[in-house]
Image: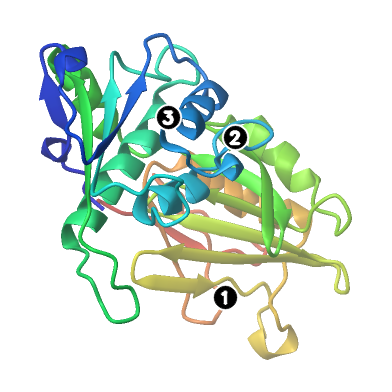
Amino acid sequence: MQHDITTLTFLPDPTTYQGKTDELCALIPPGIHSELELADVLIKELDVSKYCKGNFGMNWNVLFDEFRFWDDWKVVPQRAVIIHQDIPLLQGAGWYSLKIYLETLIESIIFQQEREPTEANPAPKRELVVIFPSQAYEELLAVLNHPPVWEVSIGFVERQFGISIEPSWSQILHHLQLLNGVTAEECWLYRENLDTMQVQYLKNKPGYYLHYSSPGRETELVASSDPASSFPPVLPFSLASQVLETFFRAENVLLLSNGSLSPMTHIHRRQRSPSPTFAVQKRNI
């Protein structure tokens, strides 16, 4: 999803903004460096849910819901204005947290603009306005346009934890080694809106099931020369880690599978392997 920076409002001095009687204005002070600090300010200024604040940072899903649906706020205005005196998070939590915050704000603004009252939800149309200093425009634009980065996380089928941003291969391998069905059973390696490789440990096999997906494409990886002999298809640890490393080290890859065995095609040369592996082909995005 493209996030248009023009959805935000820029003023030379945001503190000069004069709120109207039917508005709820939240002033974000300068020097907010952590997600927890930002959560505290939003809870106090807008009365958003305390569950926006997680144990280690912002619960972004809860915050997004709070910005879309205001019915639980003590004061429900027709217009809410969030005024930033500088750029929060960038000097502490970092550009990635700031990017999520900006995307949450922009998507929430658009949601309010497009929302129409219905019989099921007759609440009148509302408006969310987000103000930043004019001098922050270029820096915020650079954050929004930052190319997708690798993320890796582990967890269980319905719960992820241990998320790392821009990990090294050693960190990814460590995540993979934690898959034992007790500590964790799934590992995800992905880039937003591009590729995802999901590795699941199947302790009843035992073995590793790999699933690759990209927008509009789903691929299951088959480890046997006779696909019917193994379902779901599983790989040994050595081969699962080999496929994951190839996926990670290639800048853009597309895994090809027609349900039969294929040799691995390295990014620069073809190499036959006696082990069951899969075709990997460079993809231009």
Q: Relative to the observer, which residue lies in front, 271 or 164?
A: 164
Q: Relative to the observer, which residue lies in front, 177 or 81?
A: 81
Report the amino acid beneath label 2: Ser
Q: Which SS class for mark 3?
A: helix
Query: What residue is at 29 percent from the left and 21 percent from the top?
Result: 84
Q: Is residue 144 above or below residue 72?
A: above
Q: Check contact, mark 1 vs mark 2: CB within 8 A.
A: no
Report the amino acid beneath label 3: Glu
Query: What residue is at 48 percent from the left and 42 percent from the top?
Result: 48
**Cα separation between marks 1 and 2:** 33 Å
Relative image position of residue 191 (x, y in whole percent): 43, 46
Q: Is residue 227 above or below residue 150?
A: below
Report the amino acid beneath label 1: Leu
Q: Check contact, mark 1 vs mark 3: CB within 8 A.
A: no
The residue pinned by badge 2 equals 164
Q: Relative to the observer, which residue lies in front, 171 or 8?
A: 8
The residue pinned by badge 1 equals 261
In the picture, measured across the screen, residue 50 lies left or right of residue 159, that is: left
The residue pinned by badge 3 equals 45
